[in-house]
Image: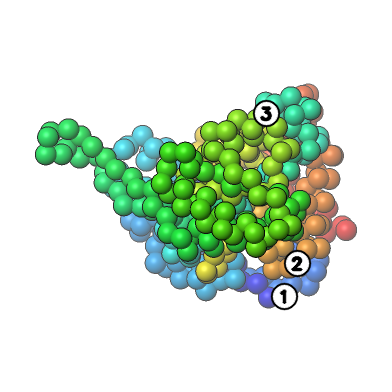
């Protein structure tokens, strides 16, 4: 297969983990005889520095003309500490999602047996947890009508975000969720706040209408506060969960820590244009340039990329190589066993590339 991949390394540890992601992608392509070409483009704080825009038109064109985007991370502390900044690196990510129509964000939450002890949860609670969060990505409060903080007629400072959803937006994301549920354990949990929010009542209404079309799937409805609690009490309950943009953002951070390390979880975002594959973690500016960032989430994002194109053996080989690296204790510091040798970002990537080449 021929694949044109747009590479967006972004900020912080992004370029370092991306280097390993691309190396693994190429190793797999060589192994299976695929022809992969890469085109690198600017995004995030880097892009602001060079062009004034966190998602420049040029980058959009590179993404639009590619078969897939491999994205690392954006964000820089100089913007975090400045609430008045007119442009922010994160806007680059949001612009990319909106312009590429990436309405479905697929975030698998899986545990690795050898890392269970790193989880803040008790072994017996977290062992075997394996679910997917389908997060709506181009609607809700992220993109609804906004008003930045400003003084109103009564002299009171006010600000506004609108949690706006349309029926077609809800329908299409629920369809994606049902398709995942059908391929998995056929259990879908619709997470909302229908006891308070009108937008959630629309979600629940549409889901209740759609559920009879999928009689093989057990559909549950759960309030988001309850879901947050259930995820730490009994994560094994979930198979596929579907939820709006903001709830999905929060719940997937919770999901990532229960597995033991944020550096392990990849994600895919799909929709009407080029799909994007990226780790769910951020740019970790403190780790930048130190060769200590875990490249596994980026590498597993490459597995999701191959799988998206039906190349399941390619994806499986990457997963096998990642598991082998963990089993061989070739790990970055945050997941390394006590007293064992600590490997750097590059060394972990190199080990995985060599493993793939030798298979
Ligand atoms: C994520 C991130 C982004 C989000 C930020 C960086 C805008 O937290 O992908 O979960 O809130 O969607
Ligand atoms: Mn987030």
Whole-angstrom CA distance, mark 1 to mark 2, is: 9 Å
The image shows residue 211 at horizontal and vertical percentages of 62, 56
Circle 2 SS class: loop
Q: Nearer the viewer, mark 1 or mark 2?
A: 2
Q: Does any portion of residue 39 appear in the rendered image? A: no
Q: Residues within 10 Å of mark 2 (few under 14, many from 20)?
A: some
The image shows residue 183 at horizontal and vertical percentages of 74, 58
Q: Residue at x 12, y 34 (%)?
A: 154
- Locate residue 116 relative to residue 246 in the image: left or right: right
Residue matched to label 3: 233
The colour scheme is rainbow
Q: What is the quadrant of the C terminus in the image? A: bottom right
Question: Is the CB of mark 3 within 8 Å of ligand 2?
Answer: no
Q: Looking at this rendering, what residue extends furthest in the bottom direction?
A: 2
Foreground of the two, 217 or 298: 217
Q: Residue at x 84, y 39 (%)?
A: 327
Residue matched to label 2: 311
Whole-angstrom CA distance, mark 2 to mark 3, is: 36 Å
Q: Nearer the viewer, mark 2 or mark 3?
A: 3
Whole-angstrom CA distance, mark 3 to mark 1, is: 44 Å
| Image position of 133 with respect to 254: above or below | below
Q: Residue at x 15, y 39 (%)?
A: 152
Question: Is the CB of mark 1 within 8 Å of ligand 1?
Answer: no
Residue 216 figure quarter: bottom right
Circle 3 SS class: helix
Residue matched to label 1: 1
Q: Please report contact status of discs 1 and 2: CB closer than 8 Å, yes or no.
A: yes
| Image position of 191 with respect to 70: above or below | above
């Amino acid at each position: 297969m021929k694949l044109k991949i747009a590479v967006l390394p972004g900020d912080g540890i992004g370029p370092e983990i991306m280097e390993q992601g691309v190396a693994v992608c190429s190793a797999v392509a060589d192994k299976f005889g695929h022809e992969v070409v890469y085109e690198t483009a600017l995004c995030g704080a880097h892009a602001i520095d060079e062009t004034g825009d966190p998602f420049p038109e040029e980058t959009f064109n590179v993404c639009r003309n590619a078969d897939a985007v491999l994205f690392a991370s954006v964000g820089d502390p100089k913007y975090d500490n400045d609430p008045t900044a007119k442009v922010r690196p994160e806007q680059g990510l949001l612009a990319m999602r909106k312009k590429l129509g990436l309405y479905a964000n697929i975030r698998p939450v899986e545990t690795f047996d050898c890392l269970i002890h790193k989880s803040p949860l008790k072994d017996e609670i977290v062992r075997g947890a394996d679910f997917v969060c389908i997060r709506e990505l181009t609607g809700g409060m992220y993109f609804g009508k906004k008003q930045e903080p400003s003084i109103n007629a009564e002299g009171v400072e006010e600000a506004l975000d609108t949690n706006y959803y349309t029926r077609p937006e809800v329908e299409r994301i629920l369809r994606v969720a049902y398709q995942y549920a059908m391929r998995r354990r056929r259990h879908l949990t619709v997470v909302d706040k229908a006891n308070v929010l009108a937008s959630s009542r629309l979600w629940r209404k549409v889901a209740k209408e759609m559920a009879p079309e999928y009689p093989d799937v057990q559909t549950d409805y759960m309030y988001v506060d309850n879901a947050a609690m259930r995820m730490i009490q009994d994560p094994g309950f979930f198979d596929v969960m579907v939820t709006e943009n903001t709830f999905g953002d929060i719940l997937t951070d919770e999901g990532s820590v229960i597995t033991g390390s944020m550096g392990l979880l990849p994600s895919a975002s799909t929709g009407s244009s080029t799909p994007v594959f990226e780790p769910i973690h951020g740019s970790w500016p403190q780790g930048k340039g130190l060769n200590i960032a875990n490249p596994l989430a980026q590498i597993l994002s490459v597995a999701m990329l191959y799988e998206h194109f039906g190349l399941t053996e390619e994806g499986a080989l990457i997963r096998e190589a990642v598991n082998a690296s963990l089993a061989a204790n070739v790990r970055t510091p945050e997941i390394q066993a006590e007293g064992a040798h600590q490997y750097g970002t590059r060394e972990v990537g190199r080990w995985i590339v060599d493993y793939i080449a030798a298979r």
